[in-house]
Amino acid sequence: MSTELKTRILDAGYDGKIVIGDVNLQVKPGEVLALIGPNGAGKSTLLRTVTSQLPEIHGTVFLSEKRIQEIERTELARKMALVTTERPRPEWMTCREMVAAGRYPYTGKLGILSDADWQIAEEALRIVQGEAFGDADYNRISDGQRQRIMLARALCQEPEVLVLDEPTSFLDIQFKMDLLSVIRRIAKQKKIGVILSMHELEFVPAVADRVACIGGGRVACLGTPEEVITGRNLEQFFGLQKDAGEEVARGIHEYAQALRKWIR
């Protein structure tokens, strides 16, 4: 796999109104890029735009130098997968069937799954450690288990780029650690480029290779977690009181250092 996701002078928003502008980002194979920023900064808007859920207002999104708007929908679904905070509520579907539904870019109009498709679904379940509840009713499992199933469903698309919008929202700490560990392992072992938005700053340095901080309608800073999650940036973009930022930033990095033992 060698697909890179790039944006060039990208303006994203709704109904012609720019929420975040002049975005120039790149996600390389095997890299995890985290988007951070206060609520309403434009993280989800940006992710929906780079996955073609929203049209660009201006600028371009590229997958391996090809404009995303020029890629046929089935081909795009084979190259890129999106996991959002929205949860489907299917009737009478097991977790295994929900995962296998991710094979839709390959099954044709009739949606008939081959033995090979089911094998890929089983492998996706194994990767997210979901085999134990594969036969359970999807609507009767926990939020953490649902998140794993939706990740496995995305992996069934065999994507080269994985986009996740707040993947750890509403999960307890153990589920957060487990899920982030799976995400990082997928990126490194399968050389999948990952871009995800996160609110829990203390987890960001443990999972991300690079961080983009969004504030003031733009990507305010981009770099390593140590370069971006600083006292000054916490005060400027997250509203921390003056002089509080340095102490909080230090605590975030110390906590993340401990987490790296488990998220790897």
Image (cartoon, helix red, strand yellow):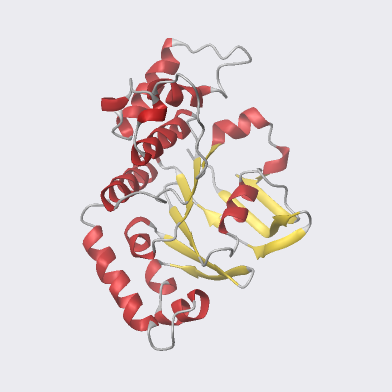
Answer above or below: position of 64 versus 258: above
Judging depth in this view, the residue of 64 and 179 nearest the camera is 179
On the image, the x and y values in percent for residue 132 come to 26, 26
Answer above or below: position of 23 versus 129: below
Answer above or below: position of 188 versus 225: above
**Residue sitting farthest toward the right:** 16
On the image, the x and y values in percent for residue 116 come to 42, 15
**Residue sitting farthest toward the bottom:** 243
Q: Quadrant of residue 99?
A: top left
Q: Quadrant of residue 104?
A: top right
On the image, the x and y values in percent for residue 119 come to 38, 18
**Left or right for 23, reference 189:** right
Instruction: Name the residue: 39% across, 36% down.
Output: 146
Give the total number of marks visible in the rendering.
0
**Left or right for 20, reference 261:** right
Instruction: Name the residue: 58% across, 32% down.
Output: 77
**Left or right for 239, reference 44:** left
On the image, the x and y values in percent for residue 18 come to 72, 62
Answer above or below: position of 222 versus 106: below
Judging depth in this view, the residue of 49 and 200 nearest the camera is 200
Judging depth in this view, the residue of 26 and 143 nearest the camera is 143
Judging depth in this view, the residue of 124 and 223 nearest the camera is 124
Instruction: Name the residue: 49% across, 13% down.
Output: 113
